[in-house]
Image: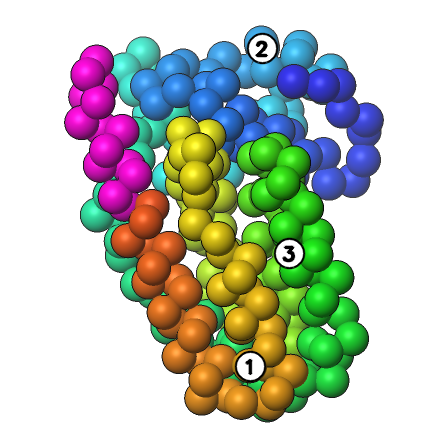
């Protein structure tokens, strides 16, 4: 982990740094997290680390263990499915509203996000790929004009990033989500709310099927439990 500079959002920085370690497999399921070691590796005090760990615990990424320890929680396929089922409905609403209200802005700013996403995939860097995906969807959430979409998804975004990371680091041929994103963008820029909603729901459902299949494959590999 690299040293972090002190900023007002230091707790969020620490949380993101720990999450990246988990998402990329540097911290494996069942592995213990020690506040002092994390604080030292990031160059921060124990307080922001303690707060960041509490956030990750509340978001299901960490789990309490005997001896007042915190460990990386195993991925729960049932929870992943339920999370994506809920997300499909909310994303459908977001993209439909974006088509109704933000078509012009989507046409101006969307292509750059698609290009950035494809470059992220070409780089093979998992954190970069996750960030590009999240940025595209966050853009559509903003275009929707619905102020409840972001807080509705917020409790699940951390866990979602972890799932994406765990799959991407193992998958040598990931789904071409950016072709799907491009089709979504075209529906939004055309102002076609019905098509945008249908494509968004299908996109998220396909992602759920893909992620869960990969998680099951990993679980069934020799030496995995």
Give the mark toward the camera: 3 or 1: 1
- Residue for badge 1: 187
> Which quadrant of the view contains residue 187?
bottom right
Mark 2 neighbour class, 10 Å CA radius: few under 14, some 14 to 19, many 20 or more: few
* Between discs 3 and 2, the one toward the N terminus: 2
Which span of residues is magenta-colored? Answer: 212-225
Judging depth in this view, the residue of 43 and 95 nearest the camera is 95
Question: From what the image shows, is residue 75 above or below residue 44?
Answer: below
Would you say residue 48 is visible in this rendering?
yes
Mark 2 touches mark 1? (CB < 8 Å): no
Under circle 1, the secondary element is helix
* Between discs 3 and 1, the one toward the N terminus: 3
Judging depth in this view, the residue of 119 and 214 nearest the camera is 119
Horizontally, residue 172 falls left or right of residue 99, namely: left
- Residue for badge 2: 36
Horizontally, residue 182 falls left or right of residue 6, namely: left
Question: Residue 138: x and y, percent?
Answer: 61, 62
């Amino acid at each position: 982990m690299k040293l972090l500079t002190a900023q007002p959002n230091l707790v969020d920085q620490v949380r993101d740094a720990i999450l990246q370690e988990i998402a990329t497999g540097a911290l494996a399921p069942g592995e213990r997290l020690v506040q002092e070691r994390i604080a030292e590796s990031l160059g921060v005090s124990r307080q922001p680390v303690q707060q960041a760990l509490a956030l990750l615990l509340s978001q299901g990424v960490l789990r309490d263990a005997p001896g007042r320890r915190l460990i990386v929680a195993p991925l729960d396929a049932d929870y992943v499915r339920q999370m994506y089922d809920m997300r499909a409905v909310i994303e459908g609403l977001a993209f439909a509203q974006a088509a109704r209200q933000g078509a012009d802005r989507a046409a101006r700013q969307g292509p750059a996000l698609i290009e950035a996403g494809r470059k992220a995939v070409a780089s093979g860097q998992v954190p970069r790929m996750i960030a590009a995906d999240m940025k595209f969807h966050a853009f559509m959430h903003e275009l929707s004009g619905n102020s409840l979409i972001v807080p509705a998804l917020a409790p699940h975004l951390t866990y979602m990033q972890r799932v994406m990371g765990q799959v991407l680091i193992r998958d040598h041929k990931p789904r071409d989500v950016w072709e799907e994103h491009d089709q979504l963008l075209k529906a939004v820029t055309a102002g076609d709310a019905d098509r945008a909603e249908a494509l968004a729901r299908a996109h998220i459902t396909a992602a759920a099927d893909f992620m869960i299949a990969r998680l099951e494959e990993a679980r069934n590999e020799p030496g995995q439990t």
